[in-house]
Image: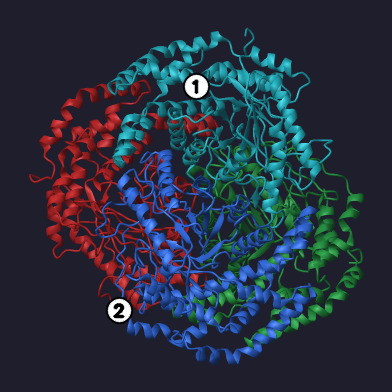
Chain colours: A blue, B cyan, C red, D green
Amino acid sequence: MTNMPISADLIAEHNAPQIEALQEDYDALGRKLARGGVDIDAIKARVAAFSVAVPSWGAGRGGTRFAKFPIPGEPTNIHEKLEDCAVINQLGRRTPRVSPHFPWDKVSDFVALREEAAALGLGWDAVNSNTFQDQPGQAHSYANGSLSSQDAGARQQAVEHNIECIEIGRQLGSTDLTVWVGDGTNFPGQQDLGRSLDRYLDAAAQIYAALPDDWRMLLEHKMFEPAFYSTVISDWGSSILAAQTLGDKCKCLVDLGHHAPNVNIEQIVARLHRFGKLGGFHFNDSKYGDDDLDSGSINPHQLFLVFNELAEAEANPRDGFNPSYMIDQSHNVTDPIESMLSSAETITACFTKASLVDRAALHAAQEANDTMMAFQALRRAYTIDVAPILAMARMEAGGAIDVLATYRASQYRARKAQERKAVGLGAGIV
Amino acid sequence: MTNMPISADLIAEHNAPQIEALQEDYDALGRKLARGGVDIDAIKARVAAFSVAVPSWGAGRGGTRFAKFPIPGEPTNIHEKLEDCAVINQLGRRTPRVSPHFPWDKVSDFVALREEAAALGLGWDAVNSNTFQDQPGQAHSYANGSLSSQDAGARQQAVEHNIECIEIGRQLGSTDLTVWVGDGTNFPGQQDLGRSLDRYLDAAAQIYAALPDDWRMLLEHKMFEPAFYSTVISDWGSSILAAQTLGDKCKCLVDLGHHAPNVNIEQIVARLHRFGKLGGFHFNDSKYGDDDLDSGSINPHQLFLVFNELAEAEANPRDGFNPSYMIDQSHNVTDPIESMLSSAETITACFTKASLVDRAALHAAQEANDTMMAFQALRRAYTIDVAPILAMARMEAGGAIDVLATYRASQYRARKAQERKAVGLGAGIV
Amino acid sequence: MTNMPISADLIAEHNAPQIEALQEDYDALGRKLARGGVDIDAIKARVAAFSVAVPSWGAGRGGTRFAKFPIPGEPTNIHEKLEDCAVINQLGRRTPRVSPHFPWDKVSDFVALREEAAALGLGWDAVNSNTFQDQPGQAHSYANGSLSSQDAGARQQAVEHNIECIEIGRQLGSTDLTVWVGDGTNFPGQQDLGRSLDRYLDAAAQIYAALPDDWRMLLEHKMFEPAFYSTVISDWGSSILAAQTLGDKCKCLVDLGHHAPNVNIEQIVARLHRFGKLGGFHFNDSKYGDDDLDSGSINPHQLFLVFNELAEAEANPRDGFNPSYMIDQSHNVTDPIESMLSSAETITACFTKASLVDRAALHAAQEANDTMMAFQALRRAYTIDVAPILAMARMEAGGAIDVLATYRASQYRARKAQERKAVGLGAGIV
Amino acid sequence: MTNMPISADLIAEHNAPQIEALQEDYDALGRKLARGGVDIDAIKARVAAFSVAVPSWGAGRGGTRFAKFPIPGEPTNIHEKLEDCAVINQLGRRTPRVSPHFPWDKVSDFVALREEAAALGLGWDAVNSNTFQDQPGQAHSYANGSLSSQDAGARQQAVEHNIECIEIGRQLGSTDLTVWVGDGTNFPGQQDLGRSLDRYLDAAAQIYAALPDDWRMLLEHKMFEPAFYSTVISDWGSSILAAQTLGDKCKCLVDLGHHAPNVNIEQIVARLHRFGKLGGFHFNDSKYGDDDLDSGSINPHQLFLVFNELAEAEANPRDGFNPSYMIDQSHNVTDPIESMLSSAETITACFTKASLVDRAALHAAQEANDTMMAFQALRRAYTIDVAPILAMARMEAGGAIDVLATYRASQYRARKAQERKAVGLGAGIV
């Protein structure tokens, strides 16, 4: 790891003038927590062991059907994306894995790609297939769906693509395949709602059959977009029934922006866990639809409540409980590196606050139907400013106390703007 | 049936001047349908065989937490409610069954009540338990839940009440128990989301165990209200997983107003059918929440699409497919008899239009990914004015051509306003 | 008009075998309406005078941020789009105007373009500006907004572009400028919510100042997308306050898919009319967000209720009441010509049904608080199958009785697929 | 104030063992803030000057249309409610005013009531009228609306009731009249949407005309409930147009639970302020509809963003800017005193965090389109645990450091359960 994109010296240099204040804040919080019987160093150790993956595609600027506004220095291939992900992990220390998307991240030599990542301190998370777009020269179009398409050729092609993704993943060292399909309809009657699911289940079973023993298949539901009347796997109900149909290695993935308005997502998390099917998360935030905003930027309390369910699940695990965590955001108006640094911090903060809930007090209040005190047990943990714990854990692992300021000081993006080729305007589709 | 509330003579008298126009419209529609290869008399026969239950409580004026505005002549006990339901069925001919709610409809002699209904031409539909309110003198409060309550006494009391409802239902001739609980929380943390479901499932299993062999237990989910943060059985996913856990005789009930905004309800119907758990419907309409408005008054097209799924399900039945249909509305601003007459007409119209879909053309278009023609297959049926078929079927069965006009001419409500005791103002709770 | 894309002979040939049945259905409906005192020919005359514009961009296949799936024979420039629009109007007869979008539809000679359209039987509707995308070589980016941008250069550029649109519109014979901006934010704090509006109002006033006397400026609000936290003109409240600030020639445009979930759009129409600011409509339908689905395909009853408000407004006009009607849809899965033919039919049907409401009965019931009969006055009109009136009006004007079948028989798209250059895959942005 | 419900000794006794820890936390936070140039004592002084009113009706247990579950010791008249409000203010020190509701709080001698409140340390906030319920013996029913009713007698009665409320308010020392009406419809067509507003405006103008010079009339909009199809004043657009029509003394009130799903409420606050019509708030929280949950219990970040807009407004005041703050919650599952203590704390915390935003940094980032740093300026303030500031301000004013623990130690509710008459079961309306 001698060729890391950010020099350790730069990080140390920027940390130096902040260490005293951090220590003071950390100690003050430590005394406060100690009064409640909590050892801050134990919490810090939990934080140090926590991680969340980043998506390769998240390193690029996102956009909408209306436009994409690129920024200078954006990555345009998986090698550049890995380098950006390395920056995020170097500074923040919570994101040691990258999740690839195919064919976007296709290379000729995946063994070499695995080594390239390792040299940057990065491993590989879930492999993502893509059957929502047509690629040049593709034999069958996904215009009418992929795994659920009425066209047997399109279904077969989608199955084979997923199996190829598994093979690539084996070379990279992944053990999860995430399957999200945009299949659905824009008109009542366009397809039969029952038969579409039958076709999906049949095709998905072929992928499942190709899964190595130690792999999982993660199904990702989404309410709408790109389909606007019906979507085959539109909600957690469809997702868990499909996962039950497919088998034990199939689990459900929760993307925080893929639900109907007002839905209680933390209860969905609890339900999936209760029935042994909680596979993982795509973290982001949203106000309207699948907005793919930065995690916790709109509703950080909801993210805390999700982690509260995960803390309960950890204390009451079901067979095979091992949720995978990933950021999945569309960075339309920020530098993606900055957004992922900030988001990893927010996610870790919610994890930390959930760890600080006095569960004995919470459960006692629940048992006594003492609603106010049960609520206060959560609220008191949520209110704590855990930033000193996060910063201390980061610094001790070689990361930056102030990740954004250090990143800016590095001039990394400006350098890349010199080195990398420019990205064209996204014309928008409307 | 000599003492029916509306005289057959009155109905006949009001029908007489309308028969000629009805026959003309019926014949014109018959010629139009014949051009498409459809026999209008066969459709009329299907309509004549169609029925939907009415709820006993729907005969009274509804209200909100803010107020209830009673009307003169409202029924105040099950005997008066039965009489009103008899009026609805006499005029409209599509609502021969009544669904009771206990303890609201409790009497000392249920065998006599069954005979009383039979004398009015009415049978009994699903029995409804009530564990969302406390009754005077009740040993345990449902303030903190019923089947899912942390209080074992409340759970046991709720189980026993449901078993008592089954026993009453046997005396009445019902074969379905509908279980809706308002259990849930108003604060994050108030109860553990996982353990609440465990308690619910355990208590529900005790009710299930008491079910006669030929009975079904229908679980009704609801997103929110009376609980405003979480609800134990909040969505179809929770409902079907609970029904799977409980056993084959347990099915899911769909109330059209109990879903998150924008949700595709017809797809939920298709999903429940696909997994063998579609038990029935509570028909109403809504714009915002569980508004309990008149069926099809806000979105009649959605109701048609639900019946389109039912027509597909009928053509592709799963084991035990036998959905129960019921109106469940809160009549806050109308005469409940008029609303149920109008609603039964709307529901039957949607059933009829779904019967008129050219399914061969629909399926062929779906197979060919001919989206526009698949959509048109549905839209052409939806556009047809089926009123003449409904009116003809009604008249031939002894009902009224114009149900509302005949009802008004009968002066039924005015007579009841003389006979029945007045209902007090609903003070509202806020 | 000798070079129309569809031959009049073809239309006549396809109409011939359908005329008898159409006449029979028309006559039967005429007798039914006559019984209620309505003259079907008078209604047909109203229909014949009704029109709705089509958008030039709607002639191309739409897409989402995930993908666009082109179809063979899509138009790629304004000349081809005009030809497609001429097909729609030839067959359907209700869409004699085209609404252009700049710079997409830019040509060197707009006078010639106007003549080209006229030769195809087409006029020009509202001119649309585009400040939500950057164009190659543009001096200032709209990445951070246009009329509301903090960057004075971007604001000025956006103002000048709109003024250029007015100038183009004058050459084309338009009298409306539609202004929709995607300006907004993705993060709390990204911009000051108040100052953003101030900048928008200031820039919009410069455009308003350039408006010819007989022109109108139509402001189009939208809840979200492309901005996902806040949008400067996000709702009708912001829109009408902006229109009031700008002046009498500024009105509000209602796009049916730009509202929050559950919102009562027909009441917004009534409110805008009440305060003299109802400028027009972008018709489409949606289930989730700005889905841009075919008009009335999801909720035709809502579209009817909108036209019911327009019928009330027509009977109680405010100063300058002259709403402009336009289709604005994204045709992701259909042939755009077919979707616009079908949509124009649906829109016209809703207009016709609203014309058939017995307003005297409606108002009398409202005056008497006779809720059921007021509702029935609307419902009875909605239930009528008005297809014969629409088809007769179409045929008499030279259009097709069955627009979709005639279009398919024409093989128009297949011919264009031979003549026109192919469109590339939309790669998606995610 | 010698007869306050909670003894000062009890408060002091419970504070004593907590003072040292509080001082330590306060000092640590003070050092942290000082590093950023913020004087913690100045912030504490702002907190000490902050207040929010409580509603008299909020002192009782709330409920839904399904049930109300009373608690022992609930207040049943305004005298008991005042006593409970005095407890809240004694312990929390941020709620020195009570907002009354008529006729619920009617007494024979309002001058005496004002003195009774003053003796408890309480003043009076906005007067609330009630025209959504019928009272026994009332001449005209509000079943079909009040200020917008088609019935002139009902309108006149509603006007006179509001004028009587003003008169009562003058005796109590209030200067605001809050007008919320439930007027609306449950069926399309039930009333004309335009004429309903005309009648509302005409009646409201009569109330406005009776307003003393130094009074304000606050209009409160609500999307739905008790009306479920349309509501006369359903959104902020209708509210501000009505307020503009009525005059300068008429302003708009924002209840956090009265909006469509997903709506950006803080932008509505900014818009109302921009056009000089921001009158005040009803604080609560919601997940689904008008859930009336405890303030900030579901989405505390949204509450912070609202206060951030208020901080901007305070820095950029418009004529007459003086928003009134009130809690308006329905306490269905908690002791109302505990909920209001907790809510006042949460509201004050959000006010405090908004005060801690580095506005110079925020504005500089906004000016530079530095989205990430603009967001961070808000997020850094939100993350701070301000509890020590709030507790210190409370203690210094004679309140409790731990309000809930001190309240429980007081045994106040248990004493009242002995003294006060029991409340009957709320039967529910359904």
The alpha-carbon separation of the residues under discs 1 and 2 comes to 68 Å
Q: Nearer the viewer, residue D198 or B4?
A: B4
Inspect this view and state whether residue A331 appears.
no
Q: Dot 1, how many residues are within 10 Å of its Cα: few (below 14), some (14-19), or many (20+)?
A: some
What residue is pinned by disc 1? B50
Above or below residue B243? Residue A78 is below
**Element marked by disc 2:** loop
Q: Is residue D81 above or below residue D403?
A: above
Using the rendered image of the protein, determine whether residue D136 is visible from the camera's viewpoint.
Answer: yes
Residue C60: x %, y % from top left: 25, 53
Question: Label 1 is found on which chain of the structure?
Answer: B
Q: Quadrant of residue D143?
A: top right
How far across and down, in percent of the image, does residue D206 sit? 60, 50
Residue B78 at x, y percent in the picture: 70, 23
Residue D158 in which image quadrant: top right
Left or right: where C395 falls relative to B353: left
Between disc 1 and disc 2, the foreground one is 2
The residue indicated by pointer 2 is: A421
Under tag 1, what secondary structure? loop
Which residue occupies the foreground of this view, A75 or A161? A161
Q: Nearer the viewer, residue B107 or C207?
A: B107
Q: Where in the figure is residue D298, as x and y percent of width and height?
A: 64, 59
Q: Quadrant of the N terminus of chain B?
A: top right
